[in-house]
Amino acid sequence: MGLIQTNAQTKGQAGEQRAAEYLAGQGLHVIERNFRVKGGEIDLICRDGAMTVFVEVRLRSSTAFGGAGASITVAKQTRLILAARHWLVRHGEVPCRFDCVLIDGDKLEWLRDAFGAD
């Protein structure tokens, strides 16, 4: 018996798919989706040449309350960095960056190098 997804989960997966297709169109290669470790998750992991790109996808139906970008708090960044460190230990240290794909309604915005791990 399969798990039943909520409407939010279904929308989230559709947003991640839209982001993956957009990034592929920009020349990135999606190598992993929904990488999870205790304490953190990364929506998409991509390659941009020799660079590993950890991508957070944020989806909001409107820009009320700051929209998708406002939801990437310092705490969220910390969880992403934790997950990225685990991924890098498993796959080898390589140059990397953190990007965000923000989807507010129909508008998609790609923020390259949105924040650092420092």
Image (cartoon, grey):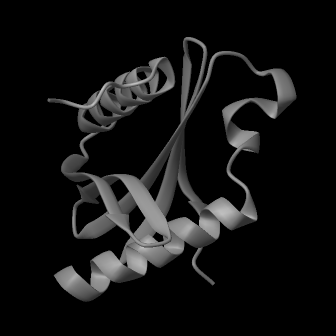
Residue at position x 47%, y 66% from top?
A: 40
- Please say whether residue 88 is visible from this viewpoint: yes
Which residue is at the far top? 106
Picture quarter with the C terminus = bottom right
Residue 17: quarter of image: top left
- Please say whether residue 94 is visible from this viewpoint: no
Residue at position x 82%, y 32% from top?
A: 66
Q: Nearer the viewer, residue 6 or 82?
A: 6
Q: Position of residue 70 (x, y in %)?
A: 76, 42
Residue 78: quarter of image: bottom right
Give the vertical position of 110 relative to 63 (above or below): below
Which residue is at the far right? 65
In the image: residue 88, left or right of residue 66: left
Label tally: 0
Q: Position of residue 62 (x, y in %)?
A: 71, 16
In the image: residue 64, left or right of residue 50: right
Residue at position x 44%, y 23% from top?
A: 6
Q: Nearer the viewer, residue 59 or 97?
A: 59
Give the vertical position of 17 relative to 82 (above or below): above
Q: Position of residue 87 (x, y in %)?
A: 30, 76
In the image: residue 88, left or right of residue 67: left
Q: Position of residue 55 (x, y in %)?
A: 43, 52
Picture quarter with the N terminus = top left
Residue 59: quarter of image: top right
Residue at position x 68%, y 51% from top?
A: 72
Q: Nearer the viewer, residue 55 or 50?
A: 55
